[in-house]
Image: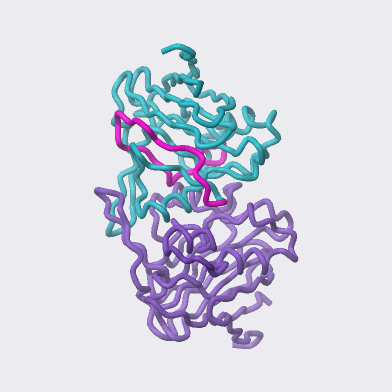
Chain colours: A cyan, B purple
Amino acid sequence: MPGTMTQKIEPRTGVAFTLSKGDRLSVIDIQGGQVADLLAFNRNDVREVICAGRTFDYLSRIYLTTGDPLYSNRSNILLKIVADDVGRHDFLLSPCSSEMFRILYGHARPHHGCFGNLANALAPYKIEPDNLPVAFNCFMNVPVDGNTGCFKVEPPLSKAGDQIVFEASTDLIVGLTACSAPLSNGGSFKPICYQIAKAI
Amino acid sequence: MPGTMTQKIEPRTGVAFTLSKGDRLSVIDIQGGQVADLLAFNRNDVREVICAGRTFDYLSRIYLTTGDPLYSNRSNILLKIVADDVGRHDFLLSPCSSEMFRILYGHARPHHGCFGNLANALAPYKIEPDNLPVAFNCFMNVPVDGNTGCFKVEPPLSKAGDQIVFEASTDLIVGLTACSAPLSNGGSFKPICYQIAKAI
């Protein structure tokens, strides 16, 4: 496709970049079984950011797929999912972090996780770590038991080359990772690829 | 109990107050069938706030009850639930707001909702509206279908006089409402009462 170039996010790292209204972002699970945490902020006012609590409310659903919008904390649509090969992603859980690796995994010298990768990548845009919300975790597979509310983090359902495609509804700053949590990724860390197709 | 006094939150309003470490807050559904949205911020640094995404992750569960902690965005415990007559609350959905009443209810001149009530009550503590996260919605009844991820907002299971009791794990600023959304409260707006039992 003209104007697109595949970028690679190495295992356990993250990046940030801008999108303009109408641009399409493809997040590609190049090897399969790998999660990518995605955050999006309004480029004109970074206090506006994707919000799971608003999105769930407006959709009456916690799982998102093709056709679904991602709403902001101000109830505006920031992104829409325009294609999805997988149909199972997570919008419940915060990005993995050093504290999470200590608490859930017992790591004494924990990796800084997607949270650290996102915080570092978004710092040049003057986005503070405390203002990173729950990410949209592409390909993350978190089945919930509706009776007890208990959930498990299972390996992603994505196969090599599967992708999810977002369209920017406004000008955005996006943070994107190749997730660092063993449980989320079937026990091995793999890269994530992405492509940006400019609107014009 | 010495040192306690029952306070009343009128229908569709909200308040804010401080708690010190060890204080206990009882949220009482005085008439039954009424939701109360609760927010808690670290009193020494209001950038630290309760966080559904971290709490879910550490509990592996989306429904909370007696014994469960509420974690912050920095992975510290801000509150613990020490008693609970009801056993069904919500931590998925953002506070109702004017935008929500427009989008979900089609109201042309919408009420400002729990979001407006919390924003107004927390403004004196220099807490910005954009920094209000998903609230812990006491008594809110949101059963989730684990297969589809679809949920419904059902009337609360709380009967008149039922309560949930929280203990502050650190010094806090708390926002608390009598929820303004018809669907969340079985179609009628009722008051919420609360009591604070000081630690010493």
Q: What residue is rendered at 45% in x and 32% in y? A: A167
Q: Is residue A162 magenta?
A: no
Relative image position of residue A98 (x, y in whole percent): 56, 36
Q: What residue is rendered at 34% in x and 30% in y? A: A83
**Please, is residue A192 above or below residue B93 in the view?**
above
Q: Nearer the viewer, residue B117 or B144?
A: B117
Q: Is residue A91 magenta?
A: yes
**Please, is residue A33 above or below residue A8 in the view?**
below
Give the quarter of the image for residue A155.
top left
Q: Where is the C terminus of chain B found, in terms of image quarters? A: bottom right
Q: What residue is rendered at 24% in x and 48% in y? A: B147
Relative image position of residue B107 (x, y in whole percent): 47, 66
Count of numbered badges drawn on the protein: 0
Residue A183 visible in the picture: no
Relative image position of residue A134 (x, y in whole percent): 51, 44
Q: Which residues are magenta?
A: A74-101
Give the quarter of the image for residue B199.
bottom right
Relative image position of residue A41 (x, y in whole percent): 58, 38
**Please, is residue B113 above or below residue A66 in the view?**
below
Position of residue A138 in the picture relative to residue B130 (left or right): left
Q: Where is the N terminus of chain B found, in terms of image quarters? A: bottom right
Q: What residue is rendered at 52% in x and 62% in y? A: B95
